[in-house]
Structures are given as C-alpha cells and as structure tokens.
Amino acid sequence: MTSHLWLLALFAFFVAVVFASIAHDAPREQAAFGIRIFGGFLLAGLALGWLMYPLPL
Amino acid sequence: MPAVVAERASSVSPWVAAALAWLVPGAGHLLLGRRQKGLIFLAAIPAMFAIGLGLSGRVFPFDFSQPLVALAAVAARGVGAPAFLAGWLDLGRGVVTDASYEYGNAFVIVSGLLNMLVALDAFDVASGRK
C-alpha cells in the first residue's frame, strides 16, 4: 500500500470523521462538515502536489 | 461558585472523563452518554493507529536529546492504551527502509493528536461547556 493518493484519502477520511464528530452533534451536520473537510484535504493535497511538480527532488 | 461548575451537565468529573477518553479512545464520550460519538472515536482512532503500525510506522521512544523525536513520542502516546499495547506486543518498532515508513509515522502520530482533542472534548462535555 504505497499509493500516495490512496493514503492521502485514507488519512483525510479519518481526520474528517473525528473532526466532524467533535465539531457537531447532529448527524446531518456531522456528515456535511465531514464531507467538506474530506474534500478540502483532497483538493489541497492535489493542488500542492501540482504546485510542487516542477520542483526538483 | 465558578460558572463552569454551575453549568455542569454531568455527574462525571471532567478529569475522569478526559483521563478515560485518553486511555481508551471514545470511552469518555460513552461514559458521558454520547454513544454515537464514542463509538465513532472507538472505531476510528485505534483503526488509524493500527494502519500506521501496518504501514511500518514507529511509536517513537522518549528521547529528549532529540526534541522532534520526543514530541513524536508524546503525540503517539496520546492514543492511550493502543500505544501501550503496541509496546507490550513489541509492535511499532518502525521499518525505516519501508516505502511507507513516513506515512505510517504520520498515521501513528496524528491518531494520538486526534485522541488528545477527543479527551479535551470529553472534558468540555463533562464540564457542561458543550
């Protein structure tokens, strides 16, 4: 299991679940907040990946 | 009388709730009657920690000559009993040559940090602040 994107998604999932559960009490609000955080993690990760693409290793 | 005490919603001491939440992820919320949250924490945080170990992550030792290692050690112990269980079972030694080593460390450390947040949340719930 070395796919960076898969691990990023898995990491984002767990963090989003815990953050959403802490921040809200109602299941509907938790789901909406969790999906927003999860999507934000994925988009930020992809954006940073593309921004770093031209940089040498 | 302090406002916090006056607003206390639970008969459980906030310190007991926080300590239990630290020791067993989710247990503090279960004790406070927040069943849904408790079960989510009980499933998600140990799973994240276990995945970190499965990715060859390391539960760092307390080495105060290396500040970052010491911080990582404190963070990983934030997950509570799973970290001690991993030490007892001789897991979490880390395989630095594995491609997934750094990923594993991220999972192990962040699971501990998340559980610290959960313990603080349990403290707030028991104090009547939430």
Image (spheres, coloured by chain):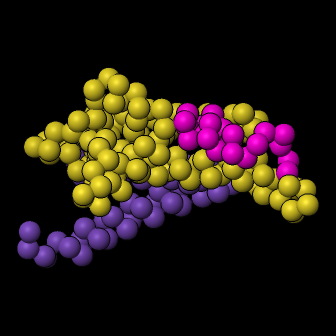
Question: Does residue B120 appear in this view?
Answer: yes
Q: Which residues are magenta?
A: B8-29
Residue at 29% in and 61% down: B67
Farthest-out residue, top: B89
Chain A drawing hue: purple
| Residue at image point 62% right, 52% down | B120
Counting from the top left corner in percent of width and height, residue B96 is at 14, 44
Residue drawn at (32%, 47%), measured in percent from left and top? Answer: B62
Image quadrant occupied by the C terminus of chain A:
bottom left
The N terminus of chain A lies in quadrant: top left
Residue nearer the viewer, A29 or B33: B33
Q: Is residue B23 above or below residue B14?
A: above
Query: Between A46 and A23, which is closer to the camera in this rendering?
Result: A23
In the rendered image, the residue lying farthest to the front is B65
Q: In the image, is residue B40 part of the stretch drawn in magenta?
A: no
Question: Which one is in front, B2 or B37?
Answer: B2
Asked where in the image residue A51 lies, by quadrant, the reply is: bottom left
Of all chains in the rendering, the one displayed in yellow is: B
**Measured along the vertical axis of the image, is residue B4 above or below residue B111?**
below
